[in-house]
Amino acid sequence: MPMKRCRNSFVRAFNLIELLIVVACLGILAALLLPSLARPHGTYARINCVNNLKQIGVAFRTWALDNGDKYPMAVSITNGGTMELVGSRVVFTHFQVMSNELSTPKILVCPEDAARQCASTFATTVPPGVPNCIPFTSNTNVSYFVGIDAVDTQPLMFLAGDANIGLDRLRPQSGLQSFSTNGNVSWYQPRHENGKKGNIGIADGSVQAFNSKELRKALKESGVTNRLAIPDFP
């Protein structure tokens, strides 16, 4: 007696139309997902940079609480500040005096600033026998400018931010630079979003991402000339 086949046991193959539909669906999904998969590093770096500047802003305010509500740039060296260094090209010391508040020098380097060397300690020397320890000794350990005159009473002034900021589309000049409210500032060379944006820590404690046009607007709205101490540009 012949054995009966179970109707539910057979496997039906795709026909050509069904196969084309599946391939088309996979193509659409790939087109939607691949751009988002290509962006994580840039997004991660930008968010990390924002977090760095937020921590820097908190460090400035915490330091000021113990120093007459003044930031290091307004306090003399003899009292633990950096006032006498304001006019020099030395920028890293404005951060170094806040080592207790910053905790680690790693937050002073933007993740997208490949030209900088991230220090692993605020110490200026490393004891013998300590491997892979990078001391905090120069502007090469810093990605961010310092707003020399930033104060809480002027909440829109620039406190710190990406140092690739130039005037009249020229290469950023290291040392103390003045940017008037109508200054033609712009971001110089790529950093965030293919050079379209940069991050600025404002004196009110916020961190803003600006394109060049928005940067000029923010400078104007600050209401004053911003003097920025810019680390050497590589």
Image (cartoon, rainbow, N blue to C red):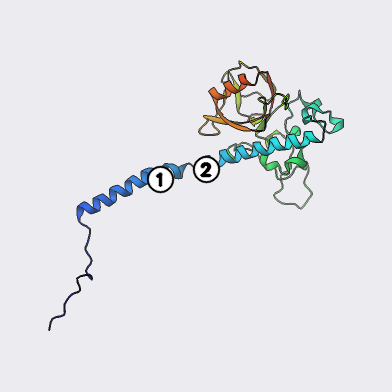
Of residues 9 and 160, the one drawn nearer to the viewer in this rendering: 9
* Residue drawn where x is 65% and y is 23% of the image: 173
Give the farthest residue toward the left. 1
Q: Are marks 2 and 1 in contact (CB under 8 Å)?
A: no
Q: Earlier in the sequence, mark 2 or mark 1?
A: 1
* Residue drawn where x is 69% and y is 37% of the image: 56
Q: Position of residue 192 (x, y in %)?
A: 54, 34
Does 25 appear above or below 162?
A: below
Q: Position of residue 38 (x, y in %)?
A: 46, 43
Q: Is residue 129 visible?
A: yes
Label ID, residue 41:
2
* Residue drawn where x is 19% and y is 71% of the image: 7
Give the farthest residue toward the bottom. 1
* Amino acid at the residue labelled 1: Leu
Q: Quadrant where the N terminus lies? A: bottom left
* Amino acid at the residue labelled 2: His
Q: In this rendering, would 13 be left or right of 143? A: left
Of residues 70 and 83, the one drawn nearer to the viewer in this rendering: 70
Does 39 appear above or below 202?
A: below
Which element carries disc 1, helix, strand or loop?
Answer: helix
* Residue drawn where x is 72% and y is 48% of the image: 133
Label ID, residue 33:
1
Does 49 appear above or below 10?
A: above
Packing grade of label 2 (10 A; few <14, some 14-19, many >=20) is few
Q: Is residue 95 visible?
A: no
Which element carries disc 2, helix, strand or loop?
Answer: helix
Would you identify the image quadrant in which residue 70 lies? Answer: top right
Of the two numbered discs 2 and 1 in the rendering, the one whose residue sits closer to the viewer: 1
Would you identify the image quadrant in which residue 46 lies? Answer: top right
Q: Position of residue 32 (x, y in %)?
A: 38, 43
